[in-house]
Amino acid sequence: MKSILDSILLESAKYINDGSVACYIPELAKADKKELGICVITNEGKQFFSGDADKFFTMQSIIKPLILLLTLMDNGIDRVRYLVGVEATGKPFDTFNYSDQALNAEHINPMVNAGAIALCTLIKGENYDEKFQRLLELVRKVSCNPDLQVDERVYLSEKATGNKNRALAYMLKAYGLVNDNVEEILDCYFKACSIKVTAMDLAQIALVFANGGIELKTNKRLFDKKYSQYINAVLMTCGMYDGSGEFALNVGVPAKSGVGGGIMAVVPNRMGIGIYSPALDKKGNSIAGIKALEELSKNLELSIF
Ligand code: GLU
């Protein structure tokens, strides 16, 4: 496996020059375009990695499945589904699927910004600090990494420049999908996007989603299987932005990408995969990361179809 990963990274690195790092959040523009790392953790408990698998980057949209998980655990499926739908928008991550005069659950899903921002209001907690703290604790638990922290610079950079997210949040409020103070909701969302992880952490999180909520090292159930089924289904159709259809064809597993350059891929009952490479394609997906996953999927026949 190690030699497969090494040769796949060598091949995928050629595509880095066709992409660019995210610039709309100034701190993200400082990422080193050349970094590329991959980590695979199998159901047998073996961990393999290659390249920059231990470099830190911010989760960005990869936090969305974890926000969804916590809201499902706190509220159950019906309540979550009532607020945020599950249909792919076919549009970039920062738009609504907004075609009528009224905005409702069917116009958003948990993997676009508007859906994730709305879901932050369903996290249980006395205030937004407590809601965020509970989310961070969940990410630490699922990643088996109690040391995960927020990247304060990225958080402040997002907070200072996130006016599109502000606009989305006020639209949600205008149509009654959220009622709380918009700046407080966004503060929780921006901090959540700014949690720092490595490709190794992502592989571990993916492994838990690949095993119906069971953490294999301790054989402990962290959450109900019906929640991983819900999340993996949404990842399959909406996880890779408006490139999810193409990804389903070429890779064929539930996955989530983020504009920090990470991809987390879930191979049910087989393995968790984490990738980091910050040069993105036009849709916001890591360009070398997608190539690496395409190759790995062909090599190991990972597609679930
Ligand atoms: N924090 C980012 C934003 O809301 C997340 C975007 C992403 O990774 O897709 O703009």
Image: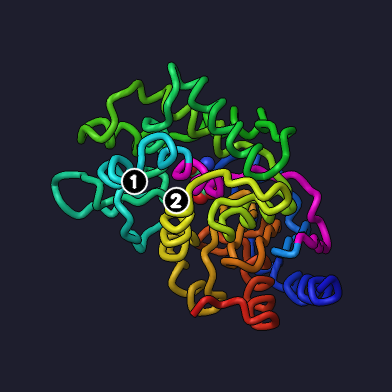
> Any magenta on residue 280?
no
* Residue at the top extreme of this rendering: 126
What is the basis of the colouring in this image? rainbow
Instruction: Check disc 2 and give the amino acid type.
Output: Tyr
Identify the residue shown where x is 41% and y is 58%: 234
Q: Earlier in the sequence, mark 2 or mark 1?
A: 1
List x then y, in percent, for residue 37: 77, 60
Residues 213 and 62: in front is: 213
Magenta region: 45-69
Q: Secondary structure at mark 2?
A: helix
Identify the residue shown where x is 54% and y is 69%: 253
Identify the residue shown where x is 52% and y is 33%: 190
**Residue 220 can be seen, yes or no:** yes
Q: CA distance from mark 2 to mark 1?
A: 8 Å
Q: Is residue 234 left or right of residue 274?
A: left
* Residue at the left extreme of this rendering: 101
Residues 145 and 247: in front is: 145
Residue 282 versus residue 97 in the image, above or below = below
Residue 227's disc is 2
- The crowding category of the residue bearing disc 1, from other C-alpha atoms within 10 Å (few below 14, some 14 to 19, many at least 20), is some
* Residue at the front extreme of this rendering: 219
Q: Is residue 118 left or right of residue 39?
A: left
Instruction: Check disc 1 and give the amino acid type.
Output: Ile
Cβ of mark 2 under 8 Å from ligand 1: the answer is no
Residue 298 versus residue 257 in the image, above or below = below
Callout 2–callout 1 Cβ contact below 8 Å: yes
Residue 53 versus residue 30 in the image, above or below = below
Q: Is residue 257 left or right of residue 68?
A: right
Residue at numbered disc 1: 77
Residue 152's disc is none
Q: Secondary structure at mark 1?
A: helix
